[in-house]
Image (spheres, helix red, strand yellow):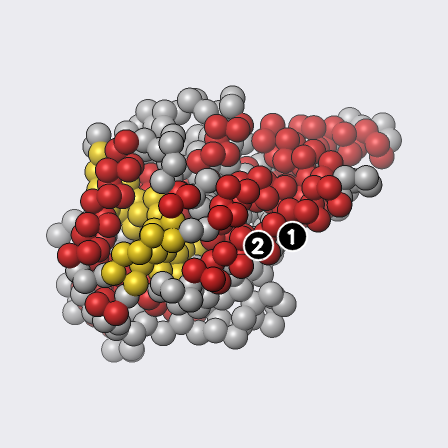
Amino acid sequence: MDLCKLDILTAHKALINKEISALELTNAFLERIKKKDKEISAFLEVSEDQALKKAKEIDEMIAKGEKLSLLAGIPMAVKDNILVKGTKTTCGSKILENYNSPYDATCIKKLKEKGVVILGKTNLDEFAMGASTENSAFFPTKNPYDLDRVPGGSSGGSCAAVSADLCCFALGSDTGGSIRQPASFCGVIGLKPTYGTVSRYGLVAFASSLDQIGPITKTLKDAEIVFEVISGKDPLDSTSIDFQFSPKDIDLKNIKAGVPKEYLVEGIDKEVKEAFTEAIEKAKKQGIKIEEISLPHTKYALSVYYLIATSEASANLARYDGIKYGFSSEKAKDLQEIYFQSRGRGFGKEVKRRIMLGTFALSAGYYDAYYLKAEKVRTLIKSDFLQVFKKVDIILTPVSPTLPFKLGEKINDPLQMYLSDIFTVSASLAGLPALSVPVAFKQNLPVGLQIIGKYFHENTILKVGRVFSIRDTAKD
């Protein structure tokens, strides 16, 4: 039995049947990280001592005959913008290089209560700003399927870790596609939940009206298990919603799926288009009814997203000034120099670019022309979805317009990099749940399908995902 290839459900059954111990399972992953992560660079920090200590605790529970939750003893990884007490949270940035987490994020607290084993923190684009994990201040992460290609971003470290069997599952954060796009590039399951269903307390803010924590897993059943644990109202997060996920079976023959005509435009890789067409045919064979739909304001989504996201980033990152938070220059002579030198050396190029764009959009004389107008169009984008969901249950689209691209291919062309999010930002702007499932391999590289659902209909998209996922083997 290759322990590192086990999904959550299979590992749980092996633990309760005493076929393996939690210590054996944890050690297997730690050894694989030592051997494999030298070439992939998925982890920023490995918490070996903490992981082994927790695994021993779970084994003691098993020895005493105590009842285990499905996640007890299961090794996981955490994107390094989510706080885990006793570990660093760098956000992939030099400005937070030595920041130690003083408390657990709410989602981490919930997972710890279920007995998970946290292996460490994974790499990301700095402050989750990017689509390739090349914007990390420390090193780029590589795609496990081709080490010359990117794993996507910004949750590239978490997705690469799950894909390379360096952990059973991981957490990521999704602002405009940062779980779904790397999940597609790495051939794993990635869920962006409905905005507010998972507490953001303990997630370092990028764009507060868009950020959402979600699971990255090997199977759809695993995604259900993790989401059920981390979802729910949190008094520490005023934007969280009183919603508790509960998986239920559905009849696929009653499902109507919409395919937006605006998404199948020029510029999509022919391999991605082929994979999408094949997925639609597969859906039809399973009795899912396919209908062409229109989301007319989709053409504005990318522009709206980058205006709103950068504006919110400008406000959220203002706290990292070398005084209140973050790296502080010791050579500065006065307050102004502290600001300039601390931010100048602490922030990377992409973060500076987005802060400047957001500050401009919020500035006097431009607020109405840019930010306010973007918020109005955001309302129209949301309205498009609400109208369409009166006719269909789900929406099917590609996740990314391209296959995983080469390292360095787009890093010096921000506009090309931003286009990687063209199919994912609309669901984020509307706050809808969306799922990436691997549906094909083209040129030996994975291709994902995006399934967008109605508000709080995570159950529907996770169940429908089983029709398409070439990776899912778990049974209820």
Instruction: Say left or right for 229 vs 426.
Output: left
**Towards the viewer: 314 or 58:** 314
Whether residue 176 appears in this view of the structure is no
Element under disc 1: helix
- Vertical placement of residue 214 versus 275, above or below: below
Label 2 sits on residue: 380
Q: Looking at the picture, how far across and down is residue 365, in whole percent?
A: 81, 39
Q: Looking at the picture, how far across and down is residue 118, in whole percent?
A: 40, 55
- Vertical placement of residue 188 versus 243, above or below: above
Amino acid marked by disc 2: Leu
Element under disc 2: helix
Residue at x 27%, y 47% (from the top left corner): 438
Residue at x 29%, y 50% (from the top left corner): 437
**Towards the viewer: 451 or 293:** 293
Mark 2–mark 1 Cα distance, whole angstroms, equals 7 Å
Whether residue 392 appears in this view of the structure is yes
Corner quadrant of residue 367: top right
| Residues at circles 2 and 1 in contact by the CB criterion of under 8 Å | yes
Q: Quadrant of the C terminus?
A: bottom left
Label 1 sits on residue: 376
Q: Looking at the picture, how far across and down is residue 257, in whole percent?
A: 31, 58
Amino acid marked by disc 1: Lys
Instruction: Say left or right for 109 vs 377.
Output: left
Residue at x 33%, y 39% (from the top left corner): 185
Q: Looking at the picture, how far across and down is residue 135, in whole percent?
A: 51, 31
